[in-house]
Amino acid sequence: MKIHVGHSTVFDFEKELYEPLKRSALSQAHDFHFPHDGNRAPENTKEIIKNSDLLLAEVSYPSTGLGIELGWADVFAVPVIAFYRFDKTPSQAIHIITNKVYRYSDNDLILMLTKALDR
């Protein structure tokens, strides 16, 4: 499955999100697109999302760019799985885009995503 990983850039996404995903068995089963892998420069992800099977959205922090990506996914009928840190409160608007919204802690991120992808 081709999965675009969307997120804010206000946290250490490389350490907290990219590295755990890359080390997990999920990276063997799926083709992840990490938009800021080694680079914090913005990337035009519109076509990438259009050609993805899923948008995996880390929604713990407000982000205009992520909001745009969620809108593109909605327009292109790309399914969205949203997830957020247990100590954060994401925008309730995410429930307009998807009913697949999950809470996680650092210790259970991969387990939670594995279960969400299996559903």
Image (cartoon, helix red, strand yellow):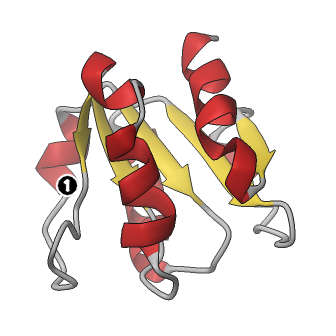
Q: Residue at x 40, y 26 (%)?
A: 26
Mark 1 sits on what residue? 46
Can residue 71 be seen here? The reply is no
Viewer-closest of 24 and 29: 24
Quadrant showing the N terminus: top left
Q: Residue at x 27, y 22 (%)?
A: 28
Occupied quadrant, residue 36 = bottom left
Can residue 54 be seen here? The reply is yes
Viewer-closest of 66 and 38: 38
Occupied quadrant, residue 71 = bottom left
Of all residues shown, which one is farthest toward the top? Answer: 119
Q: Position of residue 66 (x, y in %)?
A: 45, 67
Left or right of 6 in this view: 39: left
Viewer-closest of 86 and 24: 24
Q: Residue at x 47, y 76 (%)?
A: 8
Q: Tag 1's secondary structure?
A: helix
Viewer-closest of 102 and 51: 102
Q: Is residue 16 above or below residue 114?
A: below
Count residues near mark 1 (Cα–Cα under 10 Å), then give few for <14, some for 14-19, many for 20+.
Answer: some
Q: Position of residue 95 (x, y in %)?
A: 75, 47
Q: Is residue 4 above or below residue 70?
A: above
- Dot 1 amino acid type: Lys
Q: Is residue 80 above or below residue 114?
A: below
Left or right of 35 in this view: 4: right
Q: Position of residue 43 (x, y in %)?
A: 14, 71
Left or right of 6 in this view: 42: left
Quadrant showing the C terminus: top right
Q: Position of residue 37 (x, y in %)?
A: 19, 66
